[in-house]
Amino acid sequence: MTRGLRKQLTIAGLDAWATLLPTECSGCGALDRALCASCRLALLPAVHPVTRDDALVWAALTYEGVARHVIAAYKDGGRTDAAAALAAPLRAAIVAALAAVPSGNGGGIQLVTIPSSRLAWRLRGYHPVDALLHRAGLHPFPALAQRGESVDQVGLGREARAANKSNSLVARRPLDGARMILVDDIVTTGATLLEARRAVFAAGGTVVGLAALAETRRLLPQYSRSAQIDQQIL
Ligand SMILES: [Zn+2]
């Protein structure tokens, strides 16, 4: 092969890659392959506890700015290349939730995520939180299922949303004696995690902690497309 031909093939290869790989940072839009250096820094976990009703949730990020853009792009913009950068903060939130379990009781705890509805599977083709857990080397325990197709949550107030969520989840099997940490991506009102906790309790299991990738400011919900989809499907 001549050097010229090899060069042509290499360039053709790079062009092909450019159509397959992202060319903009999913956090700020800068020309880059995936996430630029400053957006990576913005995704470093700052794990903190937040409360929703009587529940304490360990959240790694605040759902605003770069974190909001990257999470929304990961969930609903086809930017699965952001998974590695989001897996680390989710793992940090889970570690914090585990650390908060009374000492000597940390063994045998399962991680349980919120099941996607059929509509969400059709729209996304993957489970965003399960995919992050796998990326972090963790394995979710499929304890819960959606009871039926859901109600449109958009435009409903907090109490109405909570009411819609009640009994929306059900355990796949008896959970007697099982101890779990519930894991979700974005905590807004907390209604989803509280409903998951109810379903676990109803099946005889115990929830020993709650962890989330990011939390929204409770009084200032930000309705991204991603949040709207979740409210419609959960
Ligand atoms: Zn960036």
Image: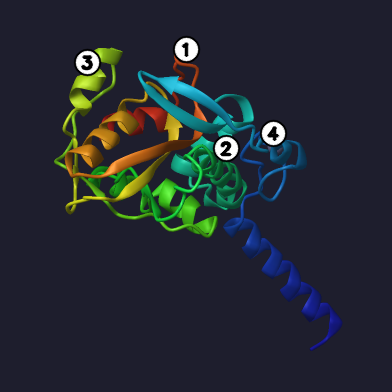
Label of residue 124 in the image? none
Would you name the residue on which mark 3 appears?
Answer: 160
Element assignment for label 3: helix
The reply to whether discs 2 and 3 touch (Cβ–Cβ < 8 Å) is no
Which residue occupies 64% across, 37% down?
45
How far is the residue under mark 1 from the one under mark 4? 21 Å
What is the three-letter code of the residue carrying label 3? Answer: Ala
Element assignment for label 4: helix
Disc 2 packing (10 Å; few <14; some 14–19; many ≥20) = many
Q: Position of residue 25 (x, y in %)?
A: 66, 41
Label of residue 42 in the image? 4
Up-down: is 15 above or below 87?
A: below
N-terminal of the pair, mark 2 or mark 1, is 2
| Pointer 4 residue Cβ closer than 8 Å to ligand 1 | yes
How far is the residue under mark 4 from the one under mark 3? 34 Å
Up-down: is 122 above or below 228?
A: below
